[in-house]
Amino acid sequence: MDLIKKGSNRARATIDGWFLPDHPARVFQEGKQADIPVIIGTTRDEGNFFVYSIKFEKRTEMFEKLSDFYGDATGAIMAHYPGESASELKQAGSRFITDAWSCILHDNC
């Protein structure tokens, strides 16, 4: 319960009765959680969760956004995410998010 309350993100869960029988806070409060120390990871398409917030119309816009984080290395990073149209850049942004999270979680940046 404290983990959910103190976390930087509020727990948002889909209660379907099969995978999650109840809200995670209630499951933990009642001691019904699985005895698994940590579950962490990403899916192949993790960045798709954010695809509707990726709104680059031009490649230069994506470059500018990434350069805030990567400075001089931005060109090398952008080479891995081709695309010119808004649709292509949306998919490139989604792949970038997936890769960035995977890199951080698996400590292979």
Image (cartoon, helix red, strand yellow):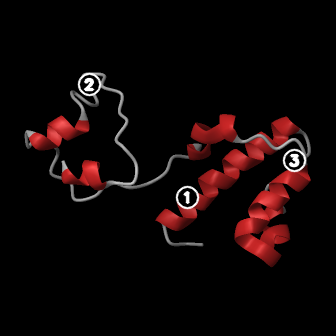
Task: Specify whether residue 80 is in view.
Answer: no
Q: Name the residue under label 3.
A: 83
Task: Specify whether residue 25 is in view.
Answer: yes
In the image, is 29 to the left or to the right of 3? left
Q: How far apart are marks 2 and 3 (CA)?
A: 40 Å
Within 10 Å of disc 1 (Cα), the crowding (few <14, some 14-19, many 20+) is some
Q: In this view, does 21 lie above or below 80?
A: above
Q: Is residue 77 above or below residue 18?
A: below
Disc on res. 55: none
Identify the residue at the far left of this view.
Answer: 30
Q: Of callouts 2 and 3, which one flags the residue occurring earlier in the amino acid sequence?
A: 2
Within 10 Å of disc 2 (Cα), the crowding (few <14, some 14-19, many 20+) is few
Position in image of residue 104 (x %, y %): 52, 66
The kind of secondary structure element at disc 2 is: loop
Q: Is residue 43 above or below residue 101?
A: above
Going by the numbered disc 1, the residue's amino acid type is Trp
Q: Name the residue under label 1.
A: 101
Quarter of the rendering containing residue 26: top left
Q: Name the residue under label 2.
A: 18
Going by the numbered disc 2, the residue's amino acid type is Trp
Q: Residue at coordinates 49% horizontally, 51% vertically from top-left? A: 42
Identify the residue at the far top of this view.
Answer: 17
Q: Of callouts 1 and 3, which one flags the residue occurring earlier in the amino acid sequence?
A: 3
Identify the residue at the far bottom of this view.
Answer: 72
